[in-house]
Image: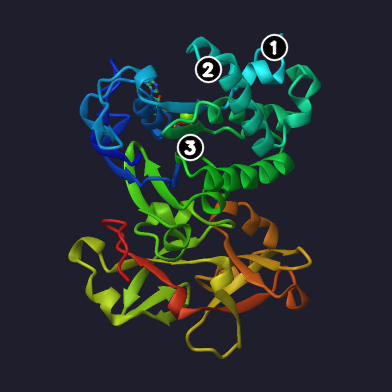
Amino acid sequence: MAEVIFDHVTRIYPGNDKPSVDDLNLDIKDGEFLVLVGPSGCGKSTTLRMLAGLEEVNKGRILIGGKDVTTMQPKDRDIAMVFQNYALYPHMTVADNMGFALKIAGTPKDEIRKRVEKAAEILDLTEFLDRKPKALSGGQRQRVAMGRAIVREPKVFLMDEPLSNLDAKLRVQTRTQIAALQRQLGVTTLYVTHDQTEALTMGDRIAVIKLGILQQVGAPTELYDRPANVFVAGFIGSPSMNINVHPVVNGHARIGEDTIELPKEAVDKLTPEDNGEIVVGFRPEDASLAAPDDENAFSLKVVNVEDLGSDGYIYGNIIKDDADRTLDSSSLMSDQNKLTTIRVNPRVLPQIGDIVKIKINPAKMHLFAPSTELRLN
Ligand SMILES: Nc1ncnc2c1ncn2[C@@H]1O[C@H](COP(=O)(O)OP(=O)(O)OP(=O)(O)O)[C@@H](O)[C@H]1O
Ligand SMILES: [Mg+2]
């Protein structure tokens, strides 16, 4: 068993006044593939490096397989890391690169050969074992770096953005391979990325972190369907969720010049700190074009449309008053990140400049309190 436990773990770098990782509680189950995701600088690498023993823990404990490793030397922790910059030794063959750590550790030669051959088979590298790294493609080199970790047969794999050196297409291929490989080997894995797509597609569970503080942990669909706060709602999913603050009037959210019904139990949870407002979020695929006289819909001035063949996207501005109706679309374009995105059937795309009615699927509405940014429904 190699369950990993972070128990109230905090890291404050010398000279910093704020922790880079703040009171982290996280439990990675035996054999689980856990993806740690968050924006640049949020503390992902710090978390991973503390587990590896490369960074000091200032408060709390780290356990691997029930054993407290908080102050243990990296070499005694039985973990293997794959980094973003997996420099291979250029003068060594693929086989020697993969077996190098075992050689240093004094493992017998035929045992090394056996493990390297087995790893090469899993990684589809058998025919390249006698080549030098320079005669490999980027994806093959990345697999050699994986091989170096696999041959050590560790209790835990740690991977820090191992795909960021690969081009977009190769990343997609390789992430599928890594996820499949991890399932085959069943080694507990902590995988770090800032790419939410990688997190959604690879992990058994995802842990989202922001400014050193864990926001939510759960299966990919849990995070997608029920984000616990505004940050997770906006971070997970592409294109990202539409999120706006709206006044609450008689149990309805006022969106521009229209109002839409809100579930009572969510409205009841609002407090005076929320100042009569609510945060409404909905994903582009959870809204649709509505009839012009639909009561429970809001008006959107179309600023841009995209036809991707399989999907169509409308980008628009919520109409707040009559002035919005007459503004030409070029002036509306300026505020790109405020645009509302709606996925529609590409065969019924409106024209740029049109005003359309949009209806949100009520079961797929995400509601948050403005004051705490926490989920209400
Ligand atoms: N040695 C250090 N000394 C002081 N501050 C540090 C040190 N290393 C990291 N930090 C700070 O700690 C915070 C977290 O850094 P960390 O490298 O863990 O982020 P990250 O999530 O891995 O980011 P990225 O996605 O850019 O790799 C950052 O604000 C960073 O500036
Ligand atoms: Mg990092």
Q: How crowded is mark 3: few (under 14 residues within 10 Å), some or many (20 or more)?
A: many
Q: Given the image, on which type of amino acid does mark 3 rest? A: Val
- The residue depicted at 57 percent of the width and 27 percent of the height is 84
Quarter holding residue 5: top left
Identify the residue position indicated by label 3 in the image: 192
Residue 309 appears in the picture as rendered? yes
Q: Given the image, on which type of amino acid does mark 2 rest? A: Leu
Q: In this view, does 327 lie above or below 89?
A: below
Task: Compare marks 3 and 2 and give the one earlier in the sequence.
Answer: 2
Cβ of mark 3 under 8 A from ligand 2: yes
Where residue 135 appears, as percent x and y from the top left, is 80, 20
Q: Nearer the viewer, mark 3 or mark 1?
A: 1
Q: Which of marks 1 and 2 is in front?
A: 2
SS for dot 2: helix
Colour option used:
rainbow
Say left or right for 368 vs 124. left
Q: Given the image, on which type of amino acid does mark 1 rest? A: Met
Where residue 362 appears, as percent x and y from the top left, is 45, 79
Task: Compare marks 3 and 1 and give the one earlier in the sequence.
Answer: 1
- The residue depicted at 63 percent of the width and 47 percent of the height is 176
Q: Do the residues labelled 3 and 2 touch (CB within 8 Å)?
A: no
199 vs 68, nearest the viewer: 68
Identify the residue position indicated by label 2 in the image: 102
Q: Distance between the residues labelled 3 and 1?
A: 28 Å
Q: Is residue 305 above or below residue 92?
A: below
Quarter holding residue 325: bottom right
SS for dot 3: strand
Identify the residue position indicated by label 1 in the image: 92
Task: Compare marks 1 and 2 and give the one earlier in the sequence.
Answer: 1
Quarter of the image that includes the C terminus? bottom left
Residue 54 appears in the picture as rendered? no
Q: Are marks 3 and 1 in contact (CB under 8 Å)?
A: no
